[in-house]
Image (cartoon, helix red, strand yellow):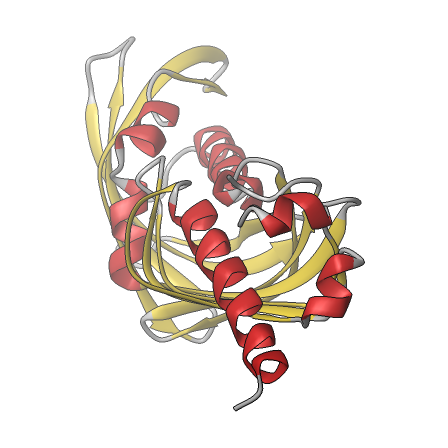
Amino acid sequence: MPENDKQPGLAEQALNKAAEMGLTSQLRDVEKMDVAIKTNPLKLIQGEVEAVSVEGEGLLMQKDLRVEKLEVQAGRISINPLAAALGKIELEQPTEATARVLLTEADLNRSLNSEYIRGMLQNLQIEAEGRALSVDVQQVEAKLPGEERLWMRSRLSIHQTGETQEVTFTARLVRSGNRIALEDIQYPEGGDLSPELTAGLQVKANELGNISNFELDGMSLRLQTLEVRRGEIDLTVEIYAEQFPS
């Protein structure tokens, strides 16, 4: 095979390896990561990449947030040709990509009980029954029974009274701007909380559903679509990258 036929494959392999290393450096663990970059020597000299695709499985983020699958597709990208010659990827200008993210019921439970999320669920300041209450949320368990709904059971500890309440509810998961939000909260077992306490917890839950919690360095995310099925959550996300992880 002529040398010029081999060279495109070599250039792509070098960039693929650099991209894989950059992405995995932002993760605590990953079961599988495949990067496919389409280019050729002439375009690479000009700092141009035709297309990039990423497929990952079992991605564990730095904050102990896990996703089962990640698929990223990007079109033409402008990179620094000198850096590319050294096996590095440096964006010459911001780029956009589209990602599909799949979270399983197990991923959701792991995230809700991670140190990061549990820390955000402590000492919640909520107005209820005409006074300010400090509430800790503990022992969270979640299920995805289908039909866009979330089932959740948790234990609430109220500082002022020393009271502990176990709360079970269902809610519809919907896209609200850049968040996965709770709507239509129902208490199937009849243990309704006060309206103020329910509203306060709903506000906090919607904060936790902000898709920016999954952002990597140099990248911002915008939620485009949300599909909640039995046992899993399927998201489509727009990525705006100012720099590539290195």
In the image, residue 1 sits, relative to residue 172, either above or below, namely below
Q: Which of 75 and 108 is in front in this view?
A: 75
Q: Is residue 41 left or right of residue 212?
A: right
Q: Which residue is drawn at 44% across and 29% down?
A: 197
Q: Position of residue 77 (x, y in %)?
A: 74, 59
Q: Residue at x 24, y 41 (%)?
A: 154
Q: How many marks?
A: 0
The furthest residue to the bottom: 1
Q: Which residue is drawn at 72% across and 70% down?
A: 50
Q: Position of residue 14 (x, y in %)?
A: 49, 60
Q: Which residue is drawn at 47% across and 39% down?
A: 205
State whether residue 77 appears in this view.
yes
Q: In this view, does 64 lie to the left or right of 224?
A: left
Which quadrant holds residue 229? Answer: bottom left
The furthest residue to the front: 2
Q: Where is residue 123 in the image (x, y as percent from the top left)?
A: 35, 15
In the image, residue 136 sits, relative to residue 187, either above or below, namely above
Q: Where is residue 198 in the image (x, y as percent from the top left)?
A: 45, 36
State whether residue 36 appears in this view.
no
Q: Which of 167 and 73 is in front in this view?
A: 73
Q: Nearer the viewer, residue 91 or 157?
A: 91
Q: Nearer the viewer, residue 15 or 176?
A: 15
In the image, residue 119 sits, relative to residue 117, either above or below, namely above
Which quadrant holds residue 114? Answer: top left
Q: Is residue 70 left or right of residue 67?
A: right
